[in-house]
Image (tube, rainbow, N blue to C red):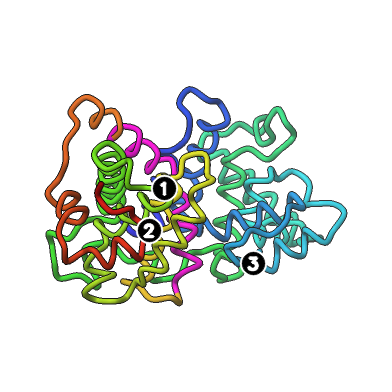
Amino acid sequence: MNVNTRIWENSIAGLPKEDQQAEQFEHYAREFFIPDSIAPSVYLANVGALMEQAAEESGVQPTPSAAKMALSMQHPIGFPTWFLAAYPDVALWFTSQDGPDRKAVDAEVTRRSAASGAAASHLVDENGFFAHAVLRTLIDLYRERTGSMLECTAPDTDLQEEGVAGSTDEQALTAQQAVDLMAANITRYERELATSYGDRFAGMRPRLTVAGLLQLGYYVLVDHVIPLATLVQASDESASADDPVVEFVERLEIEVFCAEGGEGERKRIEEACHLLRSRILDVVLQTRTDFEETPSLTVASRNFMELPQFESLRQAIGIRPAS
């Protein structure tokens, strides 16, 4: 599985069950977006542009064709919004065909759709949009006749198979496993600190900072690629969220992946981590439940809170002395 596919799969996994819109989106992803290597961040940017929504903070811009449609008062007829967002270049190409070229395209669409089992009377659905067999044929024809790559295609780095290129450690954690591990550990550390040392913390902020430090100690204290100030800032910005731990984990995931992959990838990493948010929430909730059933205190938490060599760090974070 490549990075792009994994992002889509994680997004699908976070959809609500037995929800019609969620089921439809899963179909679009599996039948169109994943096979065609559509980049999730670009797709979302195009959706925002077409729906006239404010630009996301991710900094990803809509593609030229989507931006052109966004400026128009009328979008191409017969195409649902999800298709216009993922394949804006295909929609504009089709509507630009006229005369003999349009007749040839229409004839080929009818022929290929029929070959796939779609009756001529079913080339348009009940909402007035082209049927999926027609949309698939248009994508194929666009590629064949223009020789162009789809505008929303993910970059090559996201299309490399994971575990094949760029890694010699077959035992390395997958990104999903890394997210799960960090979410579980930080949640447990926060619960341990609140349960065993609650009177020494002024609130959630310093507990989050310590939980993050216990998880990312190597990055902060040894490798020095993530400053302690970054953990403090993340805890400050997470404290007012609906679930501060979920927000904090997402922010730290971004910092870790940026430390390993480079700041130049931050926008893409932020988008990918945000798509994992529902997964993070599931792990956080399950870990809390497990902790309530079997409370514990790890050696890491006890050592940090009690050993003299960590006193300066405790003071810097704002932890009260033991009474």
Q: Quadrant of residue 159?
A: bottom left
Task: Tell me, for residue 318, which label it has, or none.
Answer: 2
Numbered disc in front, either 3 or 1: 1
Task: Tell me, for residue 253, which label it has, or none.
Answer: none
Q: Which residues are magenta?
A: 265-287
Quadrant including the N terminus: bottom left
- The relative height of residue 115 versus residue 300 in the rendered view (above or below) is above
Task: Tell me, for residue 202, which label it has, or none.
Answer: 1
Could you tell me if the residues under marks 1 and 2 are in contact, i.e. CB atoms within 8 Å?
A: yes
- Dot 2 or dot 3: first in sequence order is 3
Could you tell me if the residues under marks 2 and 3 are in contact, i.e. CB atoms within 8 Å?
A: no
Q: Please count the marks in the image.
A: 3
Residue 30 appears in the figure? no
Percent of width and height locating residue 131: 63, 37
Task: Tell me, for residue 61, which label it has, or none.
Answer: 3
- The relative height of residue 36 versus residue 309 in the rendered view (above or below) is above
Mark 2, other Cα within 10 Å: few <14 / some 14–19 / many ≥20: some
239 drawn magenta: no
Q: Nearer the viewer, residue 122 or 205?
A: 205
